[in-house]
Image (cartoon, rainbow, N blue to C red):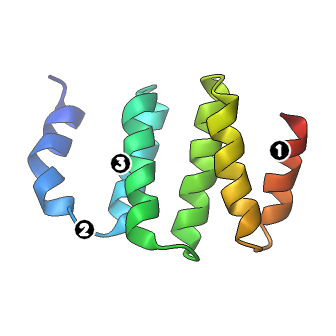
């Protein structure tokens, strides 16, 4: 088990229901390391913890959409981008562009 996984495992108890920002950072690290399934779990936890209109939610949703695209899971990507579109925020325009491109 590498050091990153050990650190995450040891501190996971302390993170729940900890701040969404910590989960976001863990998700970004998983994503950078190519651990996409783990990144998805952490991004979903960010969304759960941060609420509907939080900037962390938007960031996590966009990252989820991109991961789903990278995994060629277009249906899930469309769901995520549609959720952002429904939030009626400035970033919704980018979600609309992603939907149109898929």
Alpha-carbon neighbours of circle 2 within 10 Å: few (<14), some, or many (≥20)? few
Q: Are marks 3 and 2 in contact (CB under 8 Å)?
A: no
Residue 6 lies left or right of residue 40; in this view the side is left
Q: Give the label, 2 or 1, closer to the camera.
A: 1
Q: Is residue 9 above or below residue 59?
A: above
Q: Which residue is label 1 attached to? A: 99
User: Residue beneath label 3, please?
Assistant: 26
Measuring 33% from the left and 60% from the top, which residue is drawn there?
22
Q: Is residue 29 visible?
A: no
Cα gap from disc 1 to disc 3, whole angstroms = 27 Å
Secondary structure of residue under mark 2: loop
For the point 59% across and 59% down, which residue is it? 59
- Could you say where residue 70 lies in the image, as x and y percent from the top left? 64, 26
Q: Residues within 10 Å of mark 1 (few under 14, many from 20)?
A: some
Whole-percent x, y for residue 4 in the image: 23, 35
Residue 18: assigned label: 2
Q: Position of residue 87 (x, y in %)?
A: 70, 71
Residue 70 lies, with reference to residue 9, above or below; the image says above
**What's the CA distance linking mark 2 and mark 1?**
32 Å
Would you say 28 lies left or right of 87 here? left
Quick one: label 2 or label 1, which is nearer the N terminus? Answer: 2
| Element type at mark 3 | helix
């Amino acid at each position: 088990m590498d050091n990153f996984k050990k650190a995450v495992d040891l501190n996971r108890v302390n993170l729940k229901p900890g701040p969404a920002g910590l989960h976001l950072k863990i998700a970004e690290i998983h994503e950078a390391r190519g651990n996409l399934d783990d990144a998805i779990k952490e991004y979903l936890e960010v969304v759960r913890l941060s609420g509907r209109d939080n900037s962390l939610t938007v960031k996590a949703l966009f990252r989820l959409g991109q991961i789903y695209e990278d995994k060629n899971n277009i249906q899930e990507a469309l769901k995520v981008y549609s959720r952002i579109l429904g939030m009626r925020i400035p970033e919704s325009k980018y979600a609309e562009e992603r939907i149109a491109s898929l």
